[in-house]
Structures are given as C-alpha cells and as structure tokens.
Image (tube, rainbow, N blue to C red):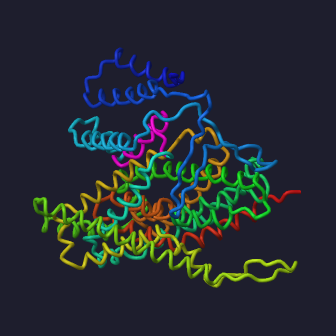
Amino acid sequence: MELIVSHRQLNFFLLAITRIVQNPVRDNVARITIILISLFSGLSICGAEVIQDDAPVVASAELEIDEATETVGESKASDAKKSNAVEVEQHDSGPFFKNDAVIFGILMVILGLIFWTSNLEFPAVKLFYKVIPMLLVCYFLPSLLTFFNLVDHHDSQLYYVATRFLLPATLVLLTLSIDLKEIYALGPKALIMFLTGSVGVVVGGPLAVLAVAWIYPEIVGVDGPAAVWRGLSTVAGSWIGGGANQAAMQVVFMTPEPDAGVEVSGQLEDLYSVMVAVDVIVAEVWMFFLLMGVGFSKDIDRIFKADSSSIERLKTKMESFSARVTRVPTTTDLMVIGAIGFGATAFAHFTGAYIAESVQATITSAQVMVTGPDGNLIMGENPYGFLKDLGLASSFFWLIVISTAIGISLSFTPFRNYEGAGASKIGTVFIFILVAVIGMGMDIRALADHPGFFLIGGIWMAIHVGLMFFVGWLIRAPYFFLAVGSKANIGGAASAPVVAAAFHPALAPVGVLLAVLGYALGTYGAMLCAWMMQSVTPIAN
C-alpha cells in the first residue's frame, strides 16, 4: 500500500489546523466551516490506494450521451500546428471513494449541512448566504470531492441515475401545478431572451476562434480531419440544446472518414474528452456568477428599468394556490406523489425508447446507396436525415419532452392538488441531488491542463453573456428572464429549472418549457456555428 500525499494538500491541511489553533473562533458556524475545509483536505491526504505492478492507472470517463457509453481519458493539448492531437494524461492513483452508495451518502450529508447552516440565525451565516446563494454552494462543495481526488465522477453511475430517474420525475412534479395562463401572461420577453442566448452561442463560437487564432494561432491550429473546430461543435450543441444535440454534433463533425486511420480516430476521441471538460467547467463558472446575481436581482432590474410585476404576480398566485391546498401529508399522499413522479418516468422511458427506435428505423430504411463519380457505391442523401438532426432519434430527448407533457397534462386534473401535500418540495429535493451530482463532475484541475481551449470557451461565454445583458437592458427585461433564458441554452433541462427555482420554486416550470425549446433548436444552431468556426480556422499550407 502506497500513501499518496501531495505537498500542496499537506500544506493546506497544516495551514488550516494552525489557523484554528492560533485564531480561536467564537462563531460556531465559522468554526464548523473551518473544520469542514480541514476535513476535505485531511481526507484527500489520507487517501491510500494499492498500486498493482507499479502500473499507472488511466482515468476513464463514461459519458452517457444519447444512451451510448463512450470511454475517454483525461487529456492535455499538444502542438496544434502539427497534428491538433490531444494526448491522454495518466494519473498516479485512483479515487479514495469508489462505491456509489458511499458517494451518494457523502453528497446527501453535504446537502444536509448546507440546508441546516442556511437556516441558522447567526448574522455571519445570513450574510454569507445572502452574498453566495445556497444553490451555488450545493454546486461548489461537491466539486471539492473531485478536486482532492476523493471521487472520480467518470467511474460513477450517479449522473445516469440522477438524469434518467430523478430528472424526469422532477419535471413532472414541478409542472404538476403549473398555471399556463399566467406563464403566457409573462409576455414575449422570456422568449426574446432565450433566443438571444442562442444567437450569442452561435455567433460567439466563431468570434472566439477568430480572436484566439489571431493571438495564439497554435491553439486553434489548422483545418483538417481532427481540427479544433470539430470538437468545439459539440460544445455548441450542448450550449444551445443539451446532451442529445451534443451527441448529434459528435456524429456529424467528429466521425472519422473510413480511410482516416487509427491515429485520426484517436485524436478525435481525445479532443472530444477535452471539449466535455470545457463544456462543463465554463458553463459552471458562468453558473457561479449567474446565481450570485440572484441575490442582486432587484438592483439589476432597477438598472435595467425592468418591470417584474408579471413575475411577482405568478409567484403570488402560485403561493396562494399552494397555501389553499396545503395539508399535512400522509403516507398515502407521499406514496401517490411517488407513483405520479416515477410512474410518469417509467411511461416516458418506455414510450420515448419506442418512438426513438421507430424514428431511427425510418431513417435507416430510407437510406439508399448510389453510384459515385468513381464508380463506387456511396450513401445518398437521406430524405429523413433531418429527423436525427432535430434529436428525434434520441430516447433522452423524448424522455424530457414526454415527462414535461405529462406534468402539464396532469395540471388540468385534480392531481394538481397534490402540490399541497408537497409534490414540488419532493421535486426540489430531487433537483438538489441532481445539482450535487453535476457539481461533483466539475473538475477544476482541467483548467491547468488545457488553458488554450478554456481560453476559447471563456471568450465564447463572455460574448454570450455580453449580448444577454445588452439585449436585456435594451428591452428592459427582468434579470429572471436573462438568467433563465441563458441557462435554458447553456444548461438545458438539468439547469434551467434549478436557476428558475433559485428565484422562487413556483417559477421552475418556466425554465422547463424554455429548456425543451432549446432541444428543438440546438442541432441546427450548432451546425451553423460549426460551419462558421470552420470558415475562420486557418487552412493548412
């Protein structure tokens, strides 16, 4: 058994202990915070792994995209001028916790501590959560588990469970009491801000590539079968729509030609793994600032001269409905709520898979072979190929759409009264579990490994954000529309309801509906963005 201890972790741990000893803290919450930080450092220091045969372990990543698993490794950028290749980085040790039951328990303890401390009456704690929203802390603390190598989110199935089981149930429970009439009364500004976010991603990609190519041309490299713009196309798909759109871009732009060879195929696989990190980390950094803005939303609305009365009216109406039907939930109530959420999830899985398979069969049956100019058979244009571009061959796409449709449909029935028994509260619990799992996947160490690609992503996101604020100021849109419109693009169905609920739980359905729209537009917007990025990429001499 070999003890893996880094000097940085050891120094951090000793410094924390020294400060506790030298500076007695009278505030109990501050003391708890320091102890928690020390605990994270101490656990990472004490992580011991058995290294067999002295062979390095290559970290793998199981990415659930369009129901297919792809194994990828930690990567670092090499000289893009020569080959645009990205080599797989090797790690000396595995994570300390590998059992998903243990990891899930740790995440629940973290969430419990955050909720508990957020309700304490200490002035320092109230000030902390006023400046830094509780939701943001729920994202950040789980990321420390990955940062200190306590867990490896790539080897965990928690993300699959959260997105395939809890997310659809959440969508049903959050839309169970939706008031479509009041949401329609919010006006066109919500849709305008959503479309502005999509335009910001489409235009921001090529502008970011152009800017970095002018300053650091070696990062962008040249056009070719493994060009950087091909990997960035998957980021565009994710930032306009979601995972299904990201997978579509990988198929369209990152599928090697039959005669490309093993080297090009490996370069594309490694490039894709890096772009996944760019996608997640840059999006979560923006999420950090977006959630911080929630605490200052009234000040931002005042600067924009925005009228948020329609939002307040929706919140008031939903609160009054909830108060009218509120009751002490019985065991029967909770079981029925569980039956509604997970029963709808089961139906959405079954129906979504059937529809996706039928669409794929239609596309496949319409595929014909034609004779090319050289006399060889090649695949002709598929008249139903656009169905796959729209994401209609993805079972995950249908899972989200059907779950949302079931929740909206049930809102017109007496089942909506189960809001009074805590339907949305259970949905909120599921959301925060999803938040913690997503936060665990944010590995901030990748920033140091691939600074060039993150520079492109950062400029890209800055353009998106700048355009959102400009249009928001121009049309006097409330900050709520800006935040939810952005995350409906950048985060999709997993993040948009979370951001909307950060303003008020009653507003979560607005994020759900906009996120579903993002899935429909994501593929075509990403394809346009990819072609523009290719046009600004230098051509090899």
| Residue 347: image location, x then y, percent | 34, 72
Q: Which of the 4 image quadrants contains residue 317? A: bottom left
Please report the bounds of the magenta region as a residue range.
Answer: 134-153
Q: In the image shown, does 390 or 468 lie closer to the viewer?
A: 390
What residue is rendered at 33% in x and 59% in y? 501
Left-right relation of 411 to 133: left
Residue 255 placement, left or right of 436: right
Residue drawn at x 32%, y 55% is 430
Q: Measured from the top left, where is residue 128 in percent x and y?
A: 33, 39
Residue 304 picture location, percent across and down: 43, 62
Q: Looking at the image, which is closer to me, 51 or 83?
A: 51
Name the side, left or right, on which 331 lies relative to 21.
left
Between 346 and 143, the residue placed more toward the observer is 346
The quadrant of the picture occupied by the C terminus is bottom right
- 145 drawn magenta: yes
Q: Is residue 222 magenta?
A: no
Q: Quadrant of residue 325 in the image?
A: bottom left
- Residue lying at the far front in this picture: please name it: 53
**Predominant secondary structure in magenta?**
helix
x, y percent for residue 343: 29, 68
